Image (cartoon, grey):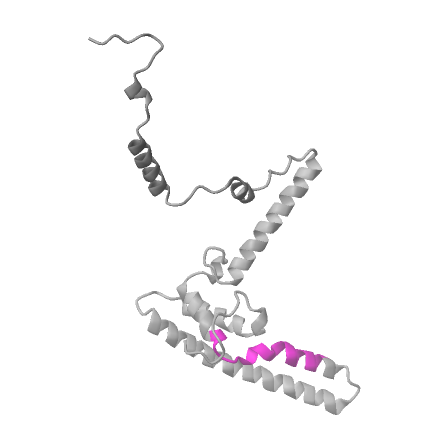
Amino acid sequence: MKLRLPGRRDRTEAAPDPDADLSAQLAKTAGKGRPTPKRHEAQGRRPGPPPPPPTTRKEAYKRMREQQAAGRGTARAAAARGDQDHLPARDRGPVRKLVRDVVDARRNAGSFFLLVAALVLVGNFVPNEQVRSYTVSLWLVFFLVIIADSIVLGRRIKKTVLERFPSSDHKMKGLVWYGISRATMVRRWRFPKPEVALGAQV
């Protein structure tokens, strides 16, 4: 029987096993899957220190307003891109998306409404009765063109929606009005922004 003195360890226990250390290192490296980053690299990726807490109520209110404004800006940018999670309720859903694409893929007479309205307004200030009569005639003709174009657009919206979503119960009157109201806006001012090019097949 071998006696073991207190305070002393067996040499077999004290001596490290190089094979075991190598296996542990290999297992640790394989589990992590990447080398350990250097200290300056790890510190470079750390976020900066958090801002100090506001000292006054006015400062806290100002910081809250800035955060809310940043959140609204991000949400509006996402909605403009057509992100369904940030769109208003009236613009959500695949059916509304299809109606927008139908409108954005064609040239609509309503897109020139502001231009014609500006011409009519300027013509009313011209001190010439003949110019004023031409202005009134132009306004009436354009109004009739918008009505005819809206009828064509409404029929196309109904046909396309029924072809793509035949099994759904659609409120066609609301969808048609949604498309016509979008068609009266200038293309670059539409919201959400157009996602199809002019002349594209929808």
Q: Nearer the viewer, residue 45 or 90?
A: 45
Q: Give how far across and how far down residue 35 sits, in percent.
A: 42, 44
* Left or right of 19 on screen, residue 143: right
Residue that sits furthest to the bottom in the current view: 130
Q: Quadrant of residue 8?
A: top left
Q: Nearer the viewer, residue 45 or 69?
A: 45
Q: Quadrant location of the N terminus? A: top left
Q: Give how far across and how far down residue 159 sits, in percent.
A: 38, 76
Q: Please, is residue 4 above or below residue 15 in the view? A: above
Q: Give how far across and how far down residue 76 sits, in percent.
A: 56, 57
Span highlighted in magenta in the image: 103-121
Q: Please, is residue 182 above or below residue 9 in the view? A: below
Residue occupying image coordinates x 70% and y 38% = 58
Q: Nearer the viewer, residue 25 or 9?
A: 9
Q: Please, is residue 64 above or below residue 149 in the view? A: above
Q: Quadrant location of the C terminus? A: bottom left
